[in-house]
Amino acid sequence: MNAPLPVHLLPEIQQRETPTALIAALKARFAERCSTALVVREQHGRDESSFASPPPAAVVFAENTNDVVDAVRLASQYNVPVIPFGVGSSLEGHLLAVQGGISIDMGGMNRVLSINAEDLTVTVQAGVTRKQLNEAVKSTGLFFPIDPGADATLGGMSATRASGTNAVRYGTMRENVLALEVVTASSDVIRTGTRAKKSSAGYDLTRLMVGSEGTLGVITEITVKLYPLPEAISAAICSFPSIEAAVRTTIEIIQMGVPIARVELIDANSVRMVNAHSKLSLREEPMLLMEFHGSPTGVKEQAELVQELAHDHGGNAFEWASTAEERTRLWTARHNAYFAAVQSRPGCRVISTDTCVPISRLADCLLDSITEADASGIPYFLVGHVGDGNFHFGYLIDPTQPKEREVAEALNHQLVNRALRLEGTCTGEHGVGLHKMNFLMTETGDGAVNMMRTIKRALDPKNIMNPGKIFTL
Amino acid sequence: MNAPLPVHLLPEIQQRETPTALIAALKARFAERCSTALVVREQHGRDESSFASPPPAAVVFAENTNDVVDAVRLASQYNVPVIPFGVGSSLEGHLLAVQGGISIDMGGMNRVLSINAEDLTVTVQAGVTRKQLNEAVKSTGLFFPIDPGADATLGGMSATRASGTNAVRYGTMRENVLALEVVTASSDVIRTGTRAKKSSAGYDLTRLMVGSEGTLGVITEITVKLYPLPEAISAAICSFPSIEAAVRTTIEIIQMGVPIARVELIDANSVRMVNAHSKLSLREEPMLLMEFHGSPTGVKEQAELVQELAHDHGGNAFEWASTAEERTRLWTARHNAYFAAVQSRPGCRVISTDTCVPISRLADCLLDSITEADASGIPYFLVGHVGDGNFHFGYLIDPTQPKEREVAEALNHQLVNRALRLEGTCTGEHGVGLHKMNFLMTETGDGAVNMMRTIKRALDPKNIMNPGKIFTL
């Protein structure tokens, strides 16, 4: 699944030298926590994207902020790139050492530092994963809602401004990170934000770092908001005669201001794949997976209203999952959709789209793109955080067939152009990485990208922090 | 009320020359829309802060983005500062021409550009005020919740990252601005963000601009989120035997996750002043003003739970305001608290505090500060967006008595230090401006402020955008 691939789609790669003196200095500082073994480097030089590049020259396993400071300081001394690594679940090539350099594995920084249940906040090291975090706060009656498909680290999720199925109600990492500790390109440790819920204290460095994809610093600690577990939760599946019917239902749910916690579209292809992968027997039709949070009566009200809206659009077979077990099975299936799809075509790679549009434009954006995908002959699946106007086509390409990649990229291109025309964005949650640099230029225009470049040059004059991502310098 | 004051508390002022050639060029470009009349300059050279400085050398009345571009371009050519002006309601000296320069009055840019009701967004020019905006969207069944006391412009509210009474439920400008048009220091027009609800498309320039207090560019257009008017609204006042009882009730409301829309603390001093100013007869005891939004049953549930919590803390005289008229009277009184206080001591100036702490620390932060304020002998009032942990003391000083200012500043200093020890911030919503630069250094440390300075120098190398605010360069 991770065999090297042609890299013809990557921006021009300029591998920088990694002097042996740097490797020696890292070994002296980190001993066995600095590895140059090929297998370790290769494991840290790839992600879930469909790209490949030579692996980093070394991997440092950080255990605390000071480790990160020293690794960045040494790398800076030798002008060598630094790439933070969480669990490797990026879909956009964020972890690839396209200009060489060293990888800093943050997995050892996995301590939950302080749970402030009475303030609904928690502070963690960057290597803590979302599932680990939820396990740690379980006894407090609180939870952390943000759930990208993978069990990503909080550091990685911050760096890509991740979201997921709960974002329609609870927001994304943008809304949920309160404060950060960051190691800058000059190997200084800075703190941004406080535990106060709001602040007007100067530039919003927290939100500048959130979504900066490792290009402005290494995030080492994160304070995020927690939420009281709802008194009542209920989940439901509803099948629809068409994707259009499911989408129109969603648009009405949002426009009416229903505080739905999750509303996920799954196309018939995905249902088929999920059924095969998770041994389920869901109706192989387009469906919405929904969840309602609130008081028992609040949940009931929401559910009744949504059932009515769904019914008006031909939705049927509203099935309720009221026990925690049934719900977990449902959402696990949803979260496994990606892996179910990969399994459905052995040896394939996924080219994943990530457009997000204003809710009223969702049907326009989606339906034409489905027609194009169907016509292409490339197997695909479609899932969407449709309550946010965000959805993902996953084109399943055979990496040995360059033509397939070409077709998939053309589909993506048409989709992004459509989304931008509809006042949306090329990426709702995966980030720009290597793949969407040109789309970013089209989306924001030269002016905004030039401002990003100016900030990058000012904060990282040697261009050592995950260079070659988001934009070319 | 706005007589010049001693400026001994201002950071060192270096007035820059405004060459007559610049004035001539502005007059040539803007004709009668460029004024050098003293009365106009003085009106644009002060705000609601207790500071004074010489007025700007000229005022340009902008009517469109191109006007702003030309004003900035000319100012840049002559190295002269540019200060955007909304309605002049800053409490922190943001509008003062401490280094000279020209003021750009944005009041003429007051068009609502597009209401996208079906997407719950609206795009406005920067000079639109919050009340004007709500008037414009009224017929859609939507509203814009953010309400600083004054009827500020959306440009000013974005620049200071404003919030207000509804922020506990709907967030601040940080959470509610989706996209901006900004004229940069190099007089380029950039666009940040899109109308999509979320995005991972590169650095979050929108949130870098929100809260930058005019120091990184002039905000000319703003896209914000709107919300469906709740099906049911109910408001209530509840008096408490002590501020502590009111605060403890608030803490429990938040910790239980009640989605309360507003929960405002008003101390007995404020009630007295408001009664006098607004011809009301509220009980002159500490009170919470609350509002609940939701479905009729949801509102009922919330209100019942809150009443129970209040009762446990000795809250009594729960009075309901169910008609829109009664509610408006109540909230108008709350919004007029500042002006009521100013009137209570003729000729006074207000030194306003703005700390915000994690909710569990609210009582600790507040109660000691009240003891100190009571002991000082300075008349004061206290109001707070306590659901967010944010509150304001207003010390009413006689500007002719330097001793009073000194005492008030010392109180503020003690309060800020206390808030920072409790992991809070020196400013929840008013911004840093001229007044809180030292506090900002204490709060974030040199590292973060130096990063802000680096960004400022990179984006505004001539230091012409509202210089001398947030930090010294």
Image (cartoon, coloured by chain):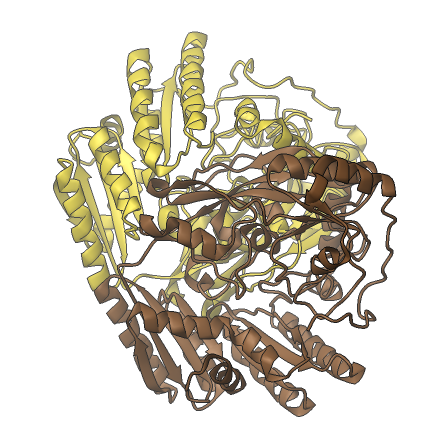
Chain colours: A brown, B yellow
Residue drawn at x 46%, y 62% as measured from the top left = A167
Quick one: A129 or B352, which is closer to the camera? A129
Quick one: B305 or B469, which is closer to the camera? B305
Residue drawn at x 57%, y 51% as measured from the top left = A158
Image vertical order of residue B88 relative to residue A232, above or below: above
Residue B361, position in %: x, y? 35, 32
Quick one: B198 or A399, which is closer to the camera? A399
Q: Looking at this rendering, what residue extends furthest in the front direction?
A: A32
Image vertical order of residue B389 relative to residue A269, above or below: above
Image quadrant assignment for residue B347? top left
* Quadrant holding the C terminus of chain B: top right
Residue A113 in sight: yes
Residue A233, position in %: x, y? 30, 66
Residue drawn at x 56%, y 55% as measured from the top left = A157
Quick one: B113 or B296, which is closer to the camera? B296
Image vertical order of residue A270 relative to residue A296, above or below: below
Residue B30 in sight: no
The answer to whether residue A131 is left or right of residue B395 is right
Count of numbered circles on the image = 0
Residue A393, position in %: x, y? 60, 77
The answer to whether residue B343 is left or right of residue B70 is left
* Quadrant holding the N terminus of chain B: top left
Residue B351, position in %: x, y? 42, 23
Image quadrant assignment for residue A170? bottom left
The answer to whether residue B32 is left or right of residue B273 is right
